[in-house]
Image (cartoon, rainbow, N blue to C red):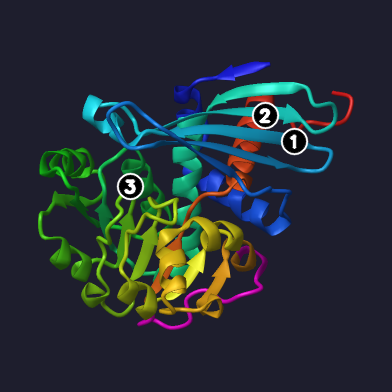
Amino acid sequence: MRIVSASEVESGLEIGPLVEQLREAFRAGCTVPLRNHYAVPTPGGGDATLLLMPAWHDRRYIGVKIVTVFPDNAKADLPSVMGTYILLSGFTGEPLAVIDGRMLTLKRTAAASALAAKYLARPDAGRLLMIGTGALAPHLILAHASVRPIHELIVWGRTPEKAERLARNFDGRRLKARATTDLAAAVGAADIVSCATLSREPLVRGAWLKPGQHIDLVGGFTPEMREADDEAIDRSRVYVDTYDGALKEAGDIVQPLARGVITEKAIAGDLAELAQGRCAGRSFYNQITLFKSVGTALEDLAAAQLLFEQMRGEPLRAGR
């Protein structure tokens, strides 16, 4: 059994091949039970979350990710999201690899947003706004820049110093980067708005949106979390990574549905339908598109399979 470190995951999963691996995984499909959430009380703080995310291909691979989300970790300069991924043989049940789940999550989440952007963002989208400065933010920036001609990056965060630091890390790396404290102006100027926060109050306002934008909402993964307001959802052509996850877990979808702002029919498609050609992506230049990601174990399994087979040098087969 292989033990795969975070550095091995980061270097082994290049964004281009990973985006294509996810496209093929969504085309083919696999068994993905609804993930289990458990609230875990923490002394002196808000509840943490424990997530169990299984998935499997019949007679090929089985995988399960164990994830913890401790929002108060930022106060101690620790990552909010941590996890471990266990990959097993679908032929025998034998454990094949234990993979750093945090880095695997960062890489596959960013790749899913890039896959959605390939269908939904304008081909000439050049200005990216990154809302949030956590561990996922650099991966999202690189992912969007891999599928669209990003030449300018604007960064906004609740802590201006962190936004400045992230912008400095990218400035001059084939793009011009700067931080801002004016979120409204930054949203209005961007071609792609990517948001990765743990916010429970909307940050992206529909009144700020302009025709032709693509909105990428990544951070909220419970019904109580919001990154965009009702007007932003209502003004956009909405897509999700999976219907099951978005309709049960995504506050950006669940709350507008509950208030009658939108109906389920307003969701234009999910990543499987986009990858399989069963629904259209961006229909016209001035359309506002919105992708809501909550994550799915299919993405983890696809990423783990790609990494394992690269390290092994060949696919897993029966009896081997």
Instruction: Please tell me whether residue 282 is drawn above or below residue 4 in the rendered image.
Output: below
Q: Which residue is mark 3?
A: 198
Report the residue at 41% width, 72% height from top.
256
- Looking at the rendered structure, the kind of residue marked 2 is Leu
Whole-number angstrom distance, CA of label 2 to CA of label 3: 28 Å
Q: Is residue 252 left or right of residue 186?
A: right
State if disc 1 and disc 2 touch (CB < 8 Å). Answer: yes
Q: Nearer the viewer, residue 112 or 197?
A: 197
Q: Of marks 2 and 3, which one's residue comes earlier in the chain? A: 2
In terms of secondary structure, where does tag 3 sit? loop
Choose mark 3 or mark 1, whichever is in front.
3
In terms of secondary structure, where does tag 1 sit? strand
Instruction: Please tell me whether residue 95 is drawn above or below residue 310 in the rendered image.
Output: above
- Looking at the rendered structure, the kind of residue marked 3 is Leu
- Classify the position of the N terminus by image quarter: top right
The magenta segment is 275-287
- Looking at the rendered structure, the kind of residue marked 1 is Tyr
In terms of secondary structure, where does tag 2 sit? strand
Q: Is residue 193 left or right of residue 182?
A: right
Q: Is residue 157 left or right of residue 5?
A: left
Q: Nearer the viewer, residue 79 or 311?
A: 79
Whole-number angstrom distance, CA of label 2 to CA of label 1: 7 Å
x then y, percent, for residue 35: 60, 45
| Label tally | 3
Does the magenta-highlighted stretch encompass residue 177?
A: no
- What's the mark number on residue 61? 1
Q: Is residue 94 left or right of residue 83?
A: right
x then y, percent, for residue 261: 41, 79
Q: Nearer the viewer, residue 278 or 171?
A: 278
**Neighbourhood count class around disc 2 (C-alpha, 10 Å): few under 14, some 14–19, many 20 upward:** many
x then y, percent, for residue 111: 48, 49
